[in-house]
Amino acid sequence: MAKFSRIDDIQPFHVMALLARAKELEAQGRDIVHMEVGEPDFPTPQPIVNAGMEAIRQGDVHYTSAVGLPELRQAIADFYQSRYQVSVTANRIVITPGASGALMLALGVVMKEGDEVLLPDPGYPCNRNFVRFLSGKTRSIEVDASSGYQLTLKHLKDNWQENTAAVIVASPSNPTGTLIARDELMAMADFVKTKEAWLIVDEIYHGLVYENEVSTALNINDNIIVINSFSKYFNMTGWRVGWLVAPVKLVSDLDKLAQNIFLAAPTPAQYAALAAFHPETITILENYKKEFKHRRDYLLPELKKLGFKIEVEPQGAFYIYANCEKFSHDSYQFAYELLENIGVAITPGKDFGENKANTFVRFAYTVSIDKLKEGVKRLAGYLAEKDS
Ligand SMILES: Cc1ncc(COP(=O)(O)O)c(C=O)c1O
């Protein structure tokens, strides 16, 4: 039988196998400290849950328009105005099944078969798989601490090809939690525009930036597509609602593609998301955010004390990307070693690319501070013994 090469080219999340093993150990009665999971541990705020349940009770369970519920598109437009003082018309907003759906749609309309997309390595792993699935090519650009693990204008200039159609960045980033400085982002956006290409800016972790004020990339120029989601800041991962903001000229193509790929985002979840911007919900979310910051401020110095090298401090998201070369030059094997020996689960670097992946791991502080303390205690005992 002929080989279906496109699917062969798609990588699984390696951490899923590790998570399965962690669950197996838990079923055997072991206590596992989960620092591998990239989703908030908090419950969805009650006003959102109530709005979702009410929608189901009312029978709001039919397809919405493929680009989403008009009220939700408007609520998101209002959110850009109130949060960033940026004026966006609701007809530029497309509601999607998570940021995942938004990334897929955006790439689907801006690239042709054989086009190239520039990505940072390390970076969010699905992006390269989306591009491959769409018969495009990715150029993964190695980034390091000197640019806060983010792409810069120089990277774009050095790597630009005739067939480069788009660049994807995330600020804050997964796995590093680092931001792109506004002036660098503007310089990149202007360069991409001169090339008549697209800058896709993933702002999914925007709500979770702990010190700096962040501004959306939306008002830089009109060759930008912004991706966002209710998954992370809004604690709605499983509801599967996200969105993108694109120039009006792309919306009919996005609509067409959405109709074909997923028809619409889940309707009750879209109604639930309408409550995400209510002041009482925001109060709950800001408390969650404070807790995430508290966890980061605890975990970051503790990991450094243990001997992990963290050259750039994360400013947002809920991740710490740490160099583990003091303990291992095979971070995949190291992650399994920690899981089996001390029940601490973390994500190996190879889930985020190939750039020095063997000497990096990602810690997610998506568990309670007490659990983090337990994880640090176990690591301290085990790593000290390993060192001696
Ligand atoms: C950078 C980034 N973008 C997009 C996503 C997809 O999120 P969702 O589809 O749940 O909105 C994730 C999930 O971890 C992510 O880390």
Image (spheres, helix red, strand yellow):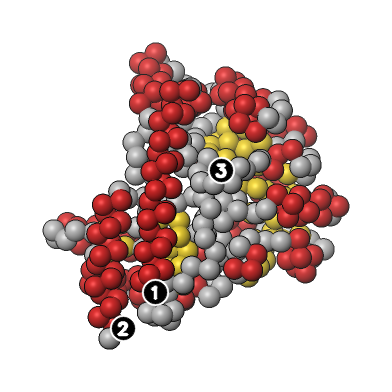
Q: CA distance from mark 2 to mark 1?
A: 10 Å
Q: Give the vertical position of 253 relative to 12 (above or below).
A: above
Identify the secondary structure beneath mark 3: loop
User: Dot 2 corresponds to which residue?
Assistant: 387
First in sequence: mark 2 or mark 1?
1
Farthest residue in the top direction? 58
Please state the horizontal and vertical placement of residue 286, each as a whole percent of the image.
Answer: 45, 35
User: Dot 3 corresponds to which residue?
Assistant: 206
Q: Quadrant of the C terminus?
A: bottom left
Please state the horizontal and vertical placement of residue 285, each as a whole percent of the image.
Answer: 43, 34
Q: Nearer the viewer, residue 147 or 75?
A: 147
Farthest residue in the right direction? 194
Q: Nearer the viewer, residue 103 or 332?
A: 332
Q: CA distance from mark 3 to mark 1?
A: 29 Å
Q: Is residue 10 visible?
A: no
First in sequence: mark 2 or mark 3?
3
Q: Nearer the viewer, residue 224 or 176?
A: 176
User: Mark 1: which amino acid?
Assistant: Gly
Q: CA distance from mark 2 to mark 3?
A: 38 Å
Please tell me which residue is depicted at 42% across the width and 60% down the height of the picture.
300
Name the mark nearer the viewer: 3 or 1.
1
Identify the secondary structure beneath mark 1: loop
